[in-house]
Amino acid sequence: MNCSSASLLSSSFLPAPPPNTNTSSSFKLPQSKPNRRHVTAKMSLNKPPDPTSLLTSVTNLLWGPSLPPGLLISTVRSAWNTTWRLMMSQLAPSDPSLAYTRPPSRFRATQIPRQNRTSLHLYVGLPCPWAHRALIVRSLKGLESAVPVSIASPGNDGSWEFKTTRDPDPDTLDPTRDKANGYKTLKQVYKSRPGGYDGRSTVPMLWDSNNKEVVCNESYDIIELFNSGLNEMAHNPGLDLSPPSLKPKIEEWNSIIYPNVNNGVYRCGFAQSQEAYDVAVNDLFNTLDKLEDHLSRFRYLCGDELTLADVCLFTTLIRFDLAYNVLFKCTRRKLVEYPNLHAYMRDIYQIPKVAETCNFQLIMEGYYKTLFPLNPGSIQPIIPVGSEHQELLRPHNRDSLCLKGARESASTLSVS
Amino acid sequence: MNCSSASLLSSSFLPAPPPNTNTSSSFKLPQSKPNRRHVTAKMSLNKPPDPTSLLTSVTNLLWGPSLPPGLLISTVRSAWNTTWRLMMSQLAPSDPSLAYTRPPSRFRATQIPRQNRTSLHLYVGLPCPWAHRALIVRSLKGLESAVPVSIASPGNDGSWEFKTTRDPDPDTLDPTRDKANGYKTLKQVYKSRPGGYDGRSTVPMLWDSNNKEVVCNESYDIIELFNSGLNEMAHNPGLDLSPPSLKPKIEEWNSIIYPNVNNGVYRCGFAQSQEAYDVAVNDLFNTLDKLEDHLSRFRYLCGDELTLADVCLFTTLIRFDLAYNVLFKCTRRKLVEYPNLHAYMRDIYQIPKVAETCNFQLIMEGYYKTLFPLNPGSIQPIIPVGSEHQELLRPHNRDSLCLKGARESASTLSVS
């Protein structure tokens, strides 16, 4: 029992075969001879390349065979880090400080013609927090039959594709085929619109089945439309998640929560420099601290009523301990360490029809497998205790906050 | 606000330059032309290689330029994963199921001649939990002047080296030069022994300054020696952390805690297959659950007295939320979610002279920078709230357990 730092690496990282022959054979790959550089130049894509000769080849290519042995590990580390940066720069565009900058949505639609509202179809993916917003508002408004949904899955090449799952979860939504168009990938759906499309094929995406056209792929536009634009077809038209009197408050919360929390977790995980990460993680946890305080006094963000701002916060919170805490290094606290935020999350989770939109296994799989630059071994961690379905059904005891919040508001008024 | 899965990757991951030109320029590297393959074949080691041409070159080398574009991401993912496996196999030897198998220590010493006991020198590194055991027992026994210490740091090539830190922490131990031999690296110290040595240069390592020989590099042997073999020189000879009456209990705890917790966290982090990880993480958390229960009734593992078994458990617990929870994917719970284990950890942390052996910044740096295959971006996460010094000084309220434990033991006896 002792510590080798990375000393197994230090003896002879390259190009000698691994010190333990079991290790090498456990890859179930043919033994390679060092420096057989061109043998691997072409290989079947179905078989993983022989790792020893792969890294030997890469090293020879980059630095030639004459590198002094003592420098090999720092060299490999540098190549590994550089490859990571390249992958991240493609996965997540950044500004000059290497901070993540989310690209804008391409299809915006605040108004759609009345005649097109009866042929809408929603495309989502279950891991995605932005798509999750649309699923929740669709459910709360009772738009399930008015706006059918197709649920995509992350494919091997990282883009959204349609495949049904082998063992569906009876309690939650599961991936489906493309029910509107019968395509294999979301890219094909986007491409089939009049004029075609070659950009980012993102979810959520609202589709007009009559005109075969993308209506909108901006999540907030979609939930506003679902909230107030389709009431004639909604089973629950009376629910208004964005009443005029609360709109300024909702917008204020969104302007705080979007950059620091919803997108804030991505700014942590996709930061490509320590400095960018440090800024993002402080913004995130300062905001969570403020929310924790606010939610100790108010049941929902805007008081007694659930609003769109709550839906938008919820879809990030529900993923926090499952993915962001570990994969995105949002480590200052887990969500379960915030008693009010966790109870608030449970409160919303327990609203009828919300839990079935949360498929925890697919959320974890989506993040840990798809974002492979952040998780090179593709190993998926065990689900945290506080994030399990049963745990989220624990009493939230937040009903009493309605009265308390009202009293405090009244006393504030009388003081001012 | 929408989800692209990895769709930025999907448009044209390779070999085209990044879609966002800001991204490329933000690397502060010269713009590369695609396919200028041999320009980077040799480069200065001080400058990071141009990432675009690097990955283009690697891809061309491995699969040729004619790969169908649709397969590029899964190809890159596979190469990335394969490179990770190779690095992990060198970092962490594994059995055929790709489970981590820790190599045995090379220098064992349960007995050392009396005349050699006055010229001992201890080599440690602050990130290492095994070395930490030796530091703590040395402090508790008052062996600081009898056994001087040299504190190594992880070097750029991953092996232990000696460098003093720019801003030392006034409250904790900090890295030092090699006070016994004046070498730059621990490898040189090992190599200078009679007969030389070319194996793993690990800490803790106990050195005989007179004979210029490695005495022992097995942590448990060292703490047993410190506990009972150097009492003539110890300021606190009366303290016995392994009294004969408790030895069987200590050994029983060690046999549970070593494989499932001390080494168990490494089995999680160094697992090279999902199956190996799943086994390790269940072993770890099943054991922590049992310890949580036991420590709700007993102040220390063996009852009212601190023993070597507690020291060995402590050095893993103190690193749990700092490193293992995130980097090693020990995600089922954080340590702060175990009230008894966390209070037990605080209890030991508050024993005089223990806190100064815990340098949290260097522990995090050691894990997140040195184990770069697990953290390809080398970004170090923010310290978790429950792991900060001030938080660990919170009252532990475990004194009363001594009496309670005694009462329960008595009642057990009377029942049986």
Image (cartoon, coloured by chain):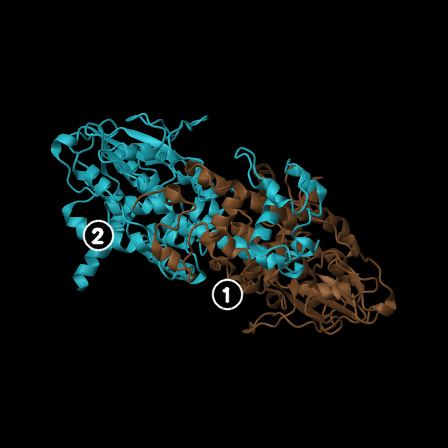
Chain colours: A cyan, B brown
Q: Nearer the viewer, residue A401 or B355?
A: B355
Label 2 and label 1 in one chain: no
**Residue under mark 1: which chain is it in?**
B
Residue B387, how many percent across, how many down?
52, 59
Visible residue check, residue A184 = yes
What percent of the width, then of the height, locates residue B154? Answer: 62, 62
Instruction: Residue at 29%, 30% (x, y): give it.
Output: A149
In the picture, measured across the screen, residue B91 lies left or right of residue A101, that is: right
Residue occupied by mark 2: A251
Tell me the amino acid under the disc marked 1: Gln
Image coords of residue A388 (percent x, y): 45, 39
**Residue B174: which quarter of the image?**
bottom right
- Report the chain holding disc 2: A
Q: Nearer the viewer, mark 2 or mark 1?
A: 2
Front residue of B119 and B260:
B119
Q: CA distance from mark 2 to mark 1?
A: 38 Å
Mark yes or no: residue B80 visible. no
Mark 1, Cα crowd under 10 Å, few <14 / some 14-19 / many 20+, is few
Q: Residue at x 69, y 71 (%)?
A: B178
Image x and y of residue B353, in percent: 63, 68
Residue type pointed to by label 2: Glu
Q: What quarter of the picture does the C terminus of chain B occupy?
A: top right
Secondary structure under the numbered disc 1 in the rendered image: helix
Q: Secondary structure at mark 2?
A: helix
Residue ID for mark 1: B390
Please tell me how crowded label 2 is: few (under 14), some (14-19), or many (20+) other residues with Cα within 10 Å.
some
